[in-house]
Image: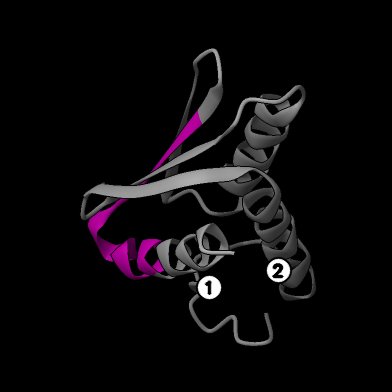
Amino acid sequence: MKDLNWVPQSCTLPTTEQPLRVAEWDTLFSEHLVTVSRPETRRLRLDLTGVPDVERQVRDLADRESGCCSFFTFTTTRSEDLVGLDIEVDPAHVGVLDALADRTAAREQL
């Protein structure tokens, strides 16, 4: 988590808070991530376990992330067993989505 060079300048989250936010996402992924897919270049699809409170946790993180990184669009869906999270970016921020996809793929393999 030392290398956060992929965090774009357009992110308004204070630099000192960025590692904490990344850690929140990493914890969510390591504890609940089931599958990762990349249906489009600008969209990442995550499926997380649908255990109690995960949907609230996902929505809370997505809302806070949208507040500092307006280039993200988050869409959550709920099925009986899973919480789906689609993350989309504008063309200028595909590199950020690539970095996020790499982080989730690493967590998925744990």
Q: Residue at x 79, y 75 (%)?
A: 16
Relative to 54, say whether 33 is above or below.
below
What percent of the width, then of the height, locates residue 3?
A: 60, 87
- Which label's residue is closer to the chain start, 2 or 1? 1
Q: Residue at x 62, y 44 (%)?
A: 67
Of the pair 33 and 70, the residue shown nearer to us: 33
Q: Is residue 45 left or right of residue 92?
A: right
Say which quadrant the C terminus sits in: bottom right
What percent of the width, then of the height, locates residue 66?
A: 56, 43
Q: In this view, does 23 lie to the left or right of 41?
A: right
Of the pair 3 and 18, the residue shown nearer to us: 3
Q: Distance between the residues labelled 2 and 1?
A: 8 Å
As shown in the figure, which amino acid type bears the numbered disc 1?
Answer: Val
In what element is the residue under mark 1?
loop
Q: Which residue is drawn at 63% across and 25% down?
A: 50
Of the pair 99 and 52, the residue shown nearer to us: 52
- Give the residue pinned by disc 2: 18
Q: What stretch is highlighted in magenta?
A: 84-98
Residue extending farthest front: 110
Relative to 47, say whether 2 is above or below.
below
Check if mark 2's residue and mark 1's residue have beta carbons within 8 Å. yes
In what element is the residue under mark 2?
helix
Relative to 104, say whether 57 is above or below.
above
As shown in the figure, which amino acid type bears the numbered disc 2?
Answer: Gln
- Give the residue pinned by disc 1: 7
Q: Residue at x 57, y 46 (%)?
A: 33
Q: How crowded is mark 1: few (under 14 residues within 10 Å), some or many (20 or more)?
A: some
